[in-house]
Every structure is written in structure tokens, then in C-alpha cells.
């Protein structure tokens, strides 16, 4: 290894060789268009020339080139090149770099940064690595048991460098376009090291017998979107697999706990300390729940009302649409507009007494019967942003989004005059009944029937909370929704109900969102059944993604299909003579590392150390 000075990573003038090689290669890159043969020649001449000089003067130059300082400099330079290749997108059209880097685009393209591995300066670095490895091995020759791992590792690196050179010189990659029932292909349109190389004879013929596309059957899927420009880009899509944990892009995971084709949310009461009064009541056979801020329910004809609150001397006052924002409540009528402090304007568009939504036509309507679901369609303007939103009187907060728009509370009290009313005082457990001008008070009891059987009091709790439990009203996909359990994301972990109709979403890392939506049938896999004739022999195989077919030195990969042409299949053909040497290098390097990690043999045989 030479003197002690050679052990310092940055000691000596040999530390300047790598920067000089990069500078010289960059100047050559600017003046000469690199070709595969030229790149290999630069790497070979640099490596062999520097090796010869180092071996000719082993004490002054060889010790430094074979020492740790030179190796550290070269490896750090290669790491920097790899970092550049990660930061600067590789092998894109020049317009991409001019749009992204402006005036710097010319220098970036001239230095070959969009093609880091195909530059003269990168080839020079590979040559320097070759020289350092070769001199280091010569200095430790001959191999002995104690340094066998060292030679294995270095031979592995030599094999990978040689394989890379063979690939750069002779690797061929191209495309073959086939059609079911079409003629057999004997040539391919090829690229060589990323550069067009015309066409080449494959040495065999290949014909497409059948092409199959498998699609997901689910109409509704979970999707992850990421912000892109002024819109969103689909990052991942998942089927409705209950109990299966899926990994999310950017971190986290989720599983589907339940799927509800026709979602209905049933409110159930749970008695708990520190809760609020709650009452379950039936009016004309319709079950209603008074809790969580909803203190009144009305009959469908508007003549009977039930209230949960303090003792009342008379029927409830006339009602209206009430909007609440930051503690300020204002009435509004459909078609009208109200303004709140802070520059927030809310316009009421439409009102639905028994709100329904047709997922097929994407339109809202008033159900002819069933329980009341008062819903107000509004348009919120704040800070120059215009947002459409549905406000549900029975489900406070449902449909709200984390989009910077303030959450608006909504309460609906029917405007129909009330002739008969029941008020339940939870603290006193008393019931006040107003009927045609008369008033009476009596103790509360579960099952109590009032107003000629039109009102039935089911259950009263002085302190309770409302639990929303989803279920499906039918097997038809009228209002699809899923309940997901999301873990390891920026928001709170736990279960969330995602409705396709309301566009609910869970916030993920990197401003991405997980949502549930109706998507067209998506491709799951595609594969080609092909027949190849080579040297008079016929071979049949199914080629799919990650399942290539091997024909002599060629490999055929499934890479493309045409959504509008079910007979078309695009295959990629690859011939890479350097690949086996690269894999051999991986094996040898692994053996060298393994030997370095198992020193027991050396302790048992110290005479050979």
C-alpha cells in the first residue's frame, strides 16, 4: 500500500487525477459526439495506460494509484456522477431540459448530464477505477488464503466493468410490432445504447397467434392521486380487497374493512359519561334521532314536531335554513346569499327535503318517500376561491374537505306551522305536550305513545354519544362506499368511510390523497401467445410482463398494447452479451464480501496468514 501518507484519502497529487479526467472528458464531450466504441476506447486507454505507468514506477506512482486515497477519490467521483443521474432526468428530449433549466440547458446538454453513463468523462472515471483495481491486485500478488476474498471482490468489479463495456459496444434493444393474424416479423427497429440503429435481421421469425388483456372486474376502486401542475395525477389504484393490506405510495398502508354498495348510515346511541342528551323517537312510523346538535324532528306533513330540550310552554317557533360560521348564525333562503365576517359569501342554490343522489346520472333529487334528509346545496366564495358543497342537516360535518375552505354548519327547521308539539326535558325526565292550544306535562317513559299514536318515544339517555354505523340498503350500486383502516399517514390513523358520491378523501404523505371512485375497467395484465421459427425449429410461448421468451442470444419482452386495437402487441427484443459478465461480477463480489465476514479459517490456520 506504500507509505503511511498514501493511506490518507486526499493526500498527494494523485487526488487531482480524477478531477483532471472529468475536466478533460467534459471538454471532449462538448466537442465530440460520443459513440459506444469511442466511450469504450476512452475507458480502455485510460485504464490500461495508467496501469502501465503505475507498474513501471511502482514506488512513486504505483503505491499511490493502488492506495486507499486514490480509490476514495475515484469512488466519490462515481458517486457524484450517480447523484447527477438521479437529479437530472435521463434520456429525455432536449425540449424537456430547455423548459426545466432555461439558460442552463445548453451547458447541461453539452456536458452530457442527461446521458451520464454515455459521456467521455464518465468513461474516464471507469478507466481510473480499472487502473486502481489492477495495480492494487498486482501489488498483492500472488493470491493467498488470507486475501482470497480481496481477489474475488476485485475480479468481480473487473467482470462488471468488462460486462458494461460489452453492453455498450454490442447490446441491441429494439421493438417488434405484431398483429394477430398478421405476417411474421423477421426484423426489428432497434436502438443501440439509446441511439437509433436502423433495422436488423433477428435470425428468426416471430408471429402473434393470440393477444389477451386481463382487466379488473371492480367498477369502483380506491385510487391515490398526487398533485401535478394545476391538477392531479393518478399514482396508484387498488381493488376492493377486504382484509388485504396495501402499501401506499410515499409510506403508510391501508385495508378495506367493509364495502357498502348502497350506503346508509345508521345512528346508534351509546351511553357514556360526559356526553349529551339523546332521544330516539318515532313520528308517523318514521324513526328519528335527536342528538349531536339536532334538537327537533318534524312529521312529513309538518303538523307535528318533537323537541329535545328545556320545558316548552308552546309549540316550536317557525323554522328556516340557518347557516353557522365561526359562531355567527344567519338565516338564508334557497336562491339567496348571505355574507359572513372575513369576506366569506355563501349562496344557497337548491334545497332537498329528502335528499337522494343518482350515481349513474350524477344528479340530485327529492325522494318521494322515506326518512327526511334535509340537504342544502351551496356555493362558498372565500379568498377568491369558489367551492361547491352539500350541507347535511342530519349529518353535521359530513362531506367537509381539508381544502382551506371554512366548514359551515347547517340547521333546517321546517317553515310549516306546527299544530301539535312534544317537548322532552332530559334533565327532568318530563314530557310537555301541546295539542290544539292545550298543554300537559307528564313523566317520561320509554315506549310512551302521544298525540293519538303519531308520536312514540323509544329511548332517552341523559348522557350519550351517537355512533354512525354504515350498512347497505340493497345490493345495487346506488351509493357505493368503503370503510378503510389507514395506518402510518400524516393524518390520524384509524377507520374512515369513503363515499364515491361525496368524493371523500384521506390525506397522505406529500399532499397525496386516497379516495374511492368509479373508474373504467383497468388493465391488470396483458400477454402474447407467439410462435417463433428458428433454424427450422418451431417454438411456442406466452410472453408477458416480467416473463420473457429466450431465443438464442435474444430475449423477447412484453412491453405495450393499444387500447383501441385489440389485435396489436408490442414486443421489445434485447441482445446483451455483457449481461452474463455483469451477473458473474455480482457473484464474485458477493463471495469476496462473504469471505471478509468469515475470519474463522484464518484463526485456525495462522501459518498461512
Image (cartoon, rainbow, N blue to C red):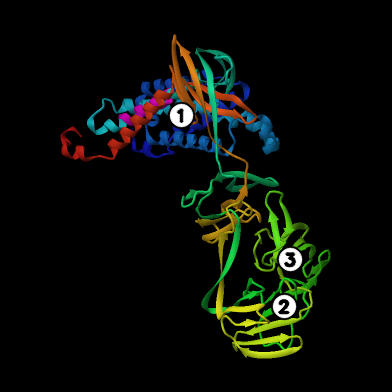
Q: Which mark is residue 547?
A: 1
Q: Quadrant of the N terminus?
A: top left
Taking the magenta stretch, the answer to whether it contains residue 552 is no
Q: Which residue is mark 3?
A: 353
Q: How would you rate the neighbour count of disc 3 (Cα within 10 Å): few for under 14, some for 14-19, many for 20 or more?
A: some
Counting residues from the N terminus, which is met first, the one under dot 3 or under dot 1? 3
Judging depth in this view, the residue of 65 and 440 nearest the camera is 440
Callout 1 secondary element: loop
Looking at this rendering, what residue extends furthest in the right direction? 336
For the point 32% across and 36% down, the residue is 593
Judging depth in this view, the residue of 490 and 593 nearest the camera is 490
Q: Which residue is mark 2?
A: 304
Q: From the viewer's perspective, is residue 295 above or below residue 28?
A: below
> Where is residue 7 drawn, in percent x and y?
37, 38
Q: Is residue 529 left or right of residue 277?
A: left
Please tell me whether mark 1 or mark 2 is closer to you in this view. Answer: 2
> Where is residue 145 drawn, in percent x and y?
23, 31
Amino acid at each position: 500500500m506504500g507509505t503511511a501518507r498514501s493511506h490518507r484519502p486526499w493526500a498527494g497529487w494523485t487526488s487531482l487525477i480524477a478531477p483532471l479526467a472529468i475536466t478533460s472528458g467534459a471538454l471532449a464531450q462538448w466537442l465530440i459526439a460520443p459513440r459506444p466504441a469511442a466511450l469504450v476506447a476512452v475507458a480502455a486507454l485510460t485504464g490500461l495506460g495508467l496501469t502501465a505507468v503505475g507498474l513501471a514506477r511502482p514506488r512513486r506512482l504505483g503505491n499511490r494509484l493502488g492506495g486507499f486515497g486514490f480509490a476514495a477519490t475515484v469512488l466519490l467521483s462515481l458517486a457524484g456522477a450517480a447523484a447527477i443521474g438521479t437529479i437530472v432526468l435521463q434520456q429525455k428530449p432536449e425540449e424537456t431540459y430547455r423548459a426545466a433549466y432555461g439558460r442552463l440547458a445548453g451547458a447541461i446538454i453539452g456536458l452530457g448530464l442527461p446521458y451520464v453513463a454515455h459521456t467521455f468523462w464518465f468513461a474516464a472515471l471507469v478507466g481510473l477505477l480499472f487502473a486502481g483495481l489492477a495495480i492494487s491486485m498486482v501489488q498483492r500478488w500472488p493470491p493467498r488464503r488470507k486475501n482470497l476474498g480481496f481477489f474475488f471482490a476485485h475480479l468481480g468489479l473487473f467482470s462488471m466493468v468488462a460486462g458494461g463495456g460489452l453492453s455498450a459496444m454490442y447490446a441491441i434493444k429494439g421493438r417488434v410490432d405484431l398483429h394477430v393474424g398478421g405476417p411474421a416479423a423477421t426484423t426489428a427497429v432497434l436502438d443501440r445504447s439509446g441511439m437509433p440503429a436502423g433495422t436488423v435481421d433477428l435470425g428468426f421469425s416471430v408471429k402473434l397467434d393470440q393477444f389477451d388483456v386481463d382487466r379488473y372486474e371492480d367498477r369502483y376502486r380506491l385510487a391515490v392521486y398526487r398533485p401535478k401542475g394545476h391538477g392531479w395525477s393518478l399514482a396508484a389504484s387498488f381493488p376492493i380487497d377486504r382484509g388485504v393490506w396495501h402499501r401506499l405510495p410515499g409510506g403508510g398502508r391501508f385495508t378495506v374493512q367493509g364495502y357498502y354498495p348502497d350506503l346508509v348510515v345508521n345512528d346508534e346511541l351509546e351511553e357514556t359519561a360526559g356526553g349529551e342528551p339523546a332521544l330516539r323517537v318515532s313520528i308517523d312510523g318514521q324513526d328519528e334521532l335527536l342528538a349531536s346538535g339536532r334538537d327537533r324532528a318534524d312529521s312529513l306533513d309538518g303538523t307535528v314536531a318533537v323537541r329535545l330540550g328545556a320545558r316548552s310552554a308552546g309549540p316550536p317557533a317557525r323554522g328556516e335554513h340557518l347557516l353557522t360560521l365561526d359562531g355567527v348564525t344567519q338565516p338564508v333562503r334557497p336562491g339567496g346569499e348571505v355574507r359572513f365576517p372575513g369576506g366569506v359569501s355563501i349562496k344557497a342554490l337548491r334545497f332537498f327535503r329528502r335528499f337522494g343522489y343518482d350515481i349513474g346520472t350524477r344528479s340530485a333529487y327529492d325522494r318521494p318517500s322515506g326518512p327526511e334528509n334535509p340537504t342544502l346545496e351551496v356555493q362558498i366564495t372565500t379568498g377568491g376561491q369558489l367551492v361547491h358543497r352539500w350541507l347535511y342537516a342530519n349529518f353535521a360535518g359530513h362531506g367537509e374537505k381539508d381544502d382551506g375552505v371554512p366548514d359551515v354548519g347547517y340547521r333546517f327547521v321546517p317553515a310549516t306551522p306546527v299544530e301539535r308539539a312534544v317537548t322532552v326535558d332530559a334533565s327532568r325526565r318530563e314530557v310537555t305536550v301541546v295539542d290544539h292550544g292545550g298543554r300537559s306535562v307528564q313523566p317520561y317513559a320509554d315506549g310512551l305513545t302521544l298525540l293519538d299514536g303519531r308520536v312514540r318515544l323509544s329511548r332517552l339517555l341523559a348522557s350519550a354519544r351517537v355512533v354512525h354505523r354504515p350498512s347497505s340498503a340493497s345490493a345495487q350500486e346506488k351509493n357505493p362506499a368503503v370503510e378503510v383502516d389507514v395506518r402510518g399517514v400524516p393524518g390520524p390513523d384509524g377507520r374512515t368511510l369513503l363515499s364515491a358520491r361525496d368524493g371523500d378523501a384521506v390525506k397522505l404523505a406529500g399532499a397525496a390523497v386516497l379516495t374511492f371512485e368509479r373508474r373504467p375497467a383497468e388493465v391488470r395484465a396483458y400477454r402474447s401467445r407467439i410462435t417463433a421459427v428458428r433454424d427450422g425449429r418451431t417454438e411456442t410461448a406466452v410472453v408477458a410482463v416480467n416473463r420473457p421468451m429466450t431465443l438464442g442470444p435474444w430475449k423477447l419482452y412484453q412491453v405495450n398494447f393499444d387500447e383501441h386495437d385489440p389485435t396489436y402487441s408490442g414486443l421489445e427484443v434485447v441482445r446483451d452479451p455483457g449481461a452474463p459478465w455483469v451477473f458473474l461480477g455480482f457473484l464474485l463480489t458477493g463471495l469476496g464480501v462473504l469471505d471478509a465476514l468469515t475470519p474463522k479459517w484464518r484463526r485456525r490456520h495462522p501459518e498461512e496468514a
